[in-house]
Amino acid sequence: MDVNEITLQSINSSLKQLTTVSQNVANVNTAGYLSGVSFSEKISNGNIINKASISLNNAPIKETHRSLDVAILGDGFFEINKNEQKFLSKNGHFYIDSEQYLTHSSGGFVMGENGRITAKNPIITTTGDVVVNGVVIDKIKIVTFDKNSPLERIGKNLYQTTALKKTVENAQLKSGSLNSSNVESSDEMVKMIEISRHIQTSQKVINAYDQLLNVGINELGKR
């Protein structure tokens, strides 16, 4: 593998990292968004592969004063059922659909400990109880999983994992609020500058190498 191939691999890896950083910056104000972390790794044959993970760092709580906005205080995710599949989300922007189901912003159903939640004008307490006319009808299900297991971004603020999920006991919620994005905008801007500089430097290396090759070929041609 020559210098050009190695440098091109490095540039491609940097471009993938730049895509992740750009996506993070674009979602800095998206409620419940979990930032992507991209990094490169050299494998045994000398090739560079790009890996990605999702940050599970907690984010600040933002008050919205909307009764069906719900934030999780601490660890845990809402369990969302969409198209008969189970997903996780940190975005607690809910609404009541035409059939009176408590619904996630993605269009999926917010799961309670007894399944889908049907409610009209519900009050959601700090313990996750869903109260209608003074009666507790269900409890919002908050789940967690082994953090060593990968989390996959599905889109529309939904995530999925193959790890075993378990209910969080004594989870604390706050209505009228949302979990903010956990993107640190200042850190992402620094990463963007560093990656851009690395790409520029790599391009200069390729140009310099090409010039050396041309000089070598011209010199050989004179002999």
Image: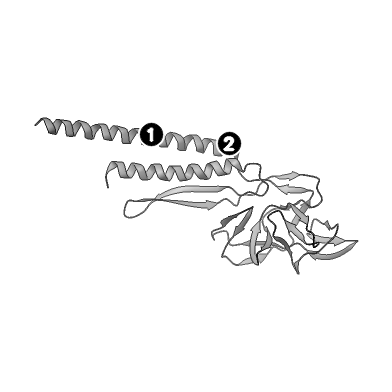
**Quarter where residue 11 is shown:** top left
- For marks 1 and 2 on the same chain, the one whose residue lies earlier in the sequence: 2
Q: Position of residue 54 (x, y in %)?
A: 56, 52
- Kindly give the residue lying farthest to the bottom in the view shown: 114
Q: Is residue 139 above or below residue 211?
A: below
Q: Which residue is drawn at the image coordinates 51% and 38% (left, top)?
A: 191
Q: Position of residue 43 (x, y in %)?
A: 36, 54
> Between residues 58 and 198, which one lies in front from this camera angle?
198
Tell me the kind of residue under disc 1. Thr
Q: Position of residue 163 (x, y in %)?
A: 57, 65
Residue labelled with disc 1: 201
Q: Which residue is drawn at the image coordinates 78% and 62% (left, top)?
A: 101
Asked which secondary structure carries label 2, the reply is helix
Q: Which residue is drawn at the image coordinates 63% and 41% (left, top)?
A: 28
- Kindly give the residue lying farthest to the right in the view shown: 133
Task: Answer left or right for 140 relative to 85.
Answer: right
Q: Position of residue 85 (x, y in %)?
A: 63, 65
Q: Residues within 10 Å of mark 1 (few under 14, many from 20)?
A: some
Residue labelled with disc 2: 186
Nearer the viewer's eye, disc 1 or disc 2? 1
